[in-house]
Image (tube, rainbow, N blue to C red):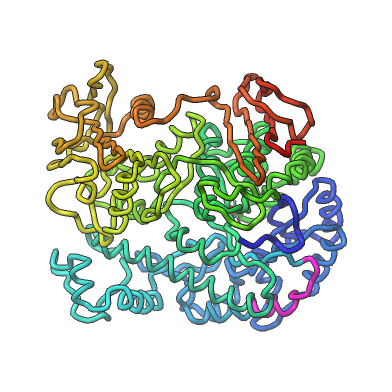
Amino acid sequence: MRWPKGLDGLCYGGDYNPEQWPEEVWHEDVALMREAGVNLVTLGVFSWARLEPSPGRHTFGWLDRVLDLLHENGVRADLATPTASPPPWFGLAHPDALPVSADGTRLTHGSRDTYCVCAPSYTEACVRVTRALAERYRDHPALAMWHVHNEYGTGCHCDHVARAFRAWLRARHGTLEALNDAWTTAFWSQNYADWDEIAPPRATQYLPNPSHVLDFRRFLSQAMLGHYRAQKAVLRELTPDVPVTTNFVFGGWVPVNHWEWADEVDLVAIDHYPEGLEEAAEQTAFAADLARGWAGGRPWLLMEQAAGVVYTGPRMRAKRPGEITLHSLQHVARGSRGAMFFQWRASRGGAELWHGGMVPHAGPDSRVFREIRDLGRLLPELAEVGEDPPAPASPAGAGSEAGSRVVADVAVLWDPECWWAVESPGFPSSEVRYLDAVRQAHRMLWRGGVTADFARPGDDLPAYRMVLVPGLYLVSDATARALSAYVERGGTLVVSFFSGIADEHARVRLGGYPGAFRDLLGVRVDEFLPLAGPVPIRFEDDGAEASGTVWSERVEPRGAEVLARYAGGDLDRLPAVTEHTHGAGRAFYVSTHLDDDAYGRILRRAGLPAAVAPPGVELVRRRGAAGREWLFALNHTTEEHEVTANGTDVLTGASVEGTLRLRPRGFAVLRAGSQGG
Ligand code: GAL
């Protein structure tokens, strides 16, 4: 982890796009930034056409003035390479570098992200503009960090991609025999006799080959990483002391494995836009925990969030008073060293004119700007949380960087490749959705007041007392061994249905489901029965009833104890939930989609403590050096709540003994520990 140069404490600011505004507005911008306590802006992320209006002709004068102005006003720059938005001339000069969709349509300029990362002319143009920027600004005192590109995620199916895909496949599989075997090409006569016969998975007549599609997504992730690396190499060469990052975006359409990317950035940075306001708090916790996982437990940075509105389905929703602050504090509590937004000033035109800004269309005399300003005054008060070094033996692993560590002793496994694989067409149920399964696991912990880490399959998991494994469809032998070893050594695992099914090539593990986990779970399944409606489940200990939906399966215990059975339907009286002792630990298996209450009951049986805070109140602990600890208490509800806590309120200096009162949508950060003053 490397921190933006010249910045201490927490980062506060957002995407700044001065090229959209006349110069006099820039002066108002910096005055308002000072008022709001902004100390970092992402600059120039879509300004390629202003920087290079025609091939090779650079116009840096305006950016010189912006950077000087920012510097004079104490604002540092997360200077972006503008490569996510090539100018109109680029596509006209290099039509072969415009992306081709799966159905063979070549897209044209008119939006953003209209390029192919495998087109040599695109990479050359990107490296050229990156070099020109870095040569120009390498010594500028405002330069704090490089922000490469924006939200990598755009795929392409053109012939450049086909060539690069083949080279990638050769490196991955070695021989055509191995590839044919891995992809099971014997089915439907897909056997490849020559590498040149292989194309990207373009639109085809009926179901595509799932192993082909999966390898293509893996390839795209690495092809984009190659594009990032090419820019990073230039930036490292010219500015070795300036950290380099890119902003990760999350979504089913994003063919990026962020576990792999996290090793290549100096600071993990994410953008987060909750899908709806009702679930915004739990989705924020989810995204923040995921970012901390990618960062290996070290500090990371929330690079973008919405200031005023959230787009949800057919209409936008305004964030309610206090939510900008609460969501920002959630990120900080869970490891972000700051809170940044898209964008500083709401645009008056262009594609995203209705996206909110820290300065909305109404200007600074607005509720949103007032909350932004108040948040900017608040964050420096919390700087101690980001600066305190971590305790040497915190579960997420010790490091020498500044920044206390979030305390978490439960983990959820996260594997984007499972997400990609499980949602293939032609699978047993289109209602089995990986993200839903992981969200439910995380939500149960969040609602129970338990802070969770996300862990990467195959990781050693010694620090966790419980690990949840939702829908881990693809499992390598190494991952299966790691999970088994974790339980043997005393860990508790809760595995849910459609896990352990396939190997890393998406081929089914034979001999009974859940292939890779049969011995660990002490069960064997010979048949899946996806459900059209709910089926009753009865718990063995007290006869309580619940229901399963989406999925069921014929589970035969092979050493496992039955905790709940199906009570009706084709599987009447057969096991629905089991528990198996394996070595010194226990492994639970949930063979259907349980509602939250029933799933929570299984988690409590597995050792999850009862909730410590009222619903909607979030408690997160961070541990620093010398026994120092901070408690973030965030009330997402519109009622007042009390929680049990002790310490000194970092914001007011008040001493809290036993009872902490939280106002509606209120919050507190308490410091406890030996240096508590
Ligand atoms: C982000 C993107 C920004 C802006 C924002 C709007 O994903 O990086 O440039 O488009 O979404 O929600």
Q: Position of residue 343 (x, y in %)?
A: 68, 52
Task: Name the residue: 30% across, 59% down.
Answer: 478
Task: Name the residue: 47% across, 40% down.
Answer: 409
Q: Where is 600 relative to 460, above or below?
A: above
**Which quadrant would residue 230 be assigned to in this image?**
bottom right
Q: Where is 4 relative to 435, above or below?
A: below
Q: Position of residue 586 (x, y in %)?
A: 30, 37
Q: Nearer the viewer, residue 336 or 362?
A: 336
Q: Nearer the viewer, residue 411 or 135?
A: 411
Task: Name the residue: 59% across, 41% down.
Answer: 310
Task: Name the residue: 62% across, 28% down.
Answer: 635
Outermost residue, bottom side: 56
Q: Can residue 340 be seen from the camera position used here?
A: no
Q: Magenta part mainly helix, strand or loop?
A: helix
Question: Is 672 colored magenta in this rendering?
Answer: no
Q: Where is 567 relative to 168, above or below?
A: above
Q: Position of residue 35 (x, y in %)?
A: 84, 46
> Is the C terminus in the top left, top right, bottom left or bottom right quadrant?
top right
Q: Position of residue 212 (x, y in %)?
A: 27, 65
Determine whether, in the image, residue 539 is placed left or right of residue 134: left
Magenta segment: 129-142
> Is the N terminus in the top left, top right, bottom left or bottom right quadrant?
bottom right
Determine whether, in the image, residue 469 is placed left or right of residue 6: left
